[in-house]
Structure formats: C-alpha cells, structure tokens
Amino acid sequence: MNTITLSPMKKQKNIALIAHDNLKPAMIEWCKTNKQILEKHFLVGTGTTASLISEATGLPVRGFNSGPLGGDQQIGARIVEGKIDILIFFSDPLSAHPHDPDVKALLRIAQVFDIPIANNEATADFLITSHYMNEEYPRNVMELKK
C-alpha cells in the first residue's frame, strides 16, 4: 500500500481523551497518575469525559460534544485536519453503545491517518511512556487507489 507523508507530529502532542461511561473513573485515575506527562501536551476530549478530567486533575482539557451527540465525529474531523496526534479511548467492550457506528468511524479514521490509538490502560501506559512522546514523529497516511 502506498502512503503519503504528512507533516510530523511535534514534540508537544495533541492528545484526545475519550471514555465510555463505565470507564470514566478509570480514565480519571489514569490521568491523575500521568498528570506530569499529560500537562506537557494539549488535551481535548468528548463532553463529560473532558469536564470530569479537568475537575479531578486541574488539567486543561478542551471539551467537544459528548460521544452520542457527535463528539466522536468532532474528534475524527480534527484527526483529518492534522490536529490530533494520539487517541486514548477507554472503550467498554462489554456494553452496547447506540453511537457504535460513530466509534467505529473514529477508530477507522485514526488508523487511516496513522494516529496511535490506546483502547485500554495498559496500551495507554506503554504509549505515553514511549520516548516518541518527547520528539517529533513522522506520520504517513494511507493513499487510496485511484
């Protein structure tokens, strides 16, 4: 598959934080634990998740709509615009979600645009402790066949 090289991710990353309802407490605790790393980067999130993280940690998190009201799509649009570098989405695999098509679209667009995705705490830990968090990183987008 051919790829197109985009401008690299900068040292200071744009990180999207999303959590399904059952995992919002875990996301908040994860953000508290990793506050010293997260405060060096720009943070955005879907509605309630962004508010709860800000309230619990003091981290500035720009909030979009809640996931079911288009927040996942708003973050997906920012990925396409090159304004999100990392997606941390604590998704609940054991519950049904009415906005599941939006979630799948978000994950698909993150893959297409070569965005690192963490769907659970272990992956998020590995991701944000990587040495790539503190340096530029090249990004390649899948080129669609004409």
Image (spheres, grey):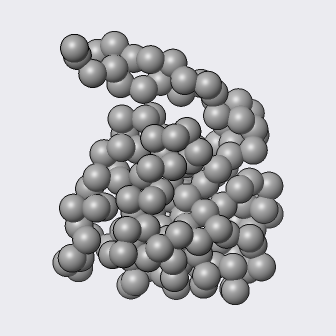
Residue 71: x, y in percent? 43, 67
Please state, as top left, top right, bottom left or bottom right, where the N terminus lies in the image.
Answer: top left
Please state, as top left, top right, bottom left or bottom right, where the C terminus lies in the image.
Answer: top left
Q: Quadrant of residue 145?
A: top left
Left or right, residue 113 beside residue 135: left
Residue 65: x, y in percent? 47, 73
x 42%, y 26%: residue: 141
Q: Nearer the viewer, residue 57 or 100?
A: 100
Left or right, residue 51 beside residue 36: left
Q: Nearer the viewer, residue 49 or 135?
A: 49
Q: How many marks?
A: 0
x 23%, y 76%: residue: 97
Q: Nearer the viewer, residue 132 or 107?
A: 107
Residue 54: x, y in percent? 69, 79
Question: Eyeballing the image, is 93 above or below 137?
Answer: below
Left or right, residue 30 beside residue 141: right
x 34%, y 51%: residue: 107
Residue 49: x, y in percent? 53, 78
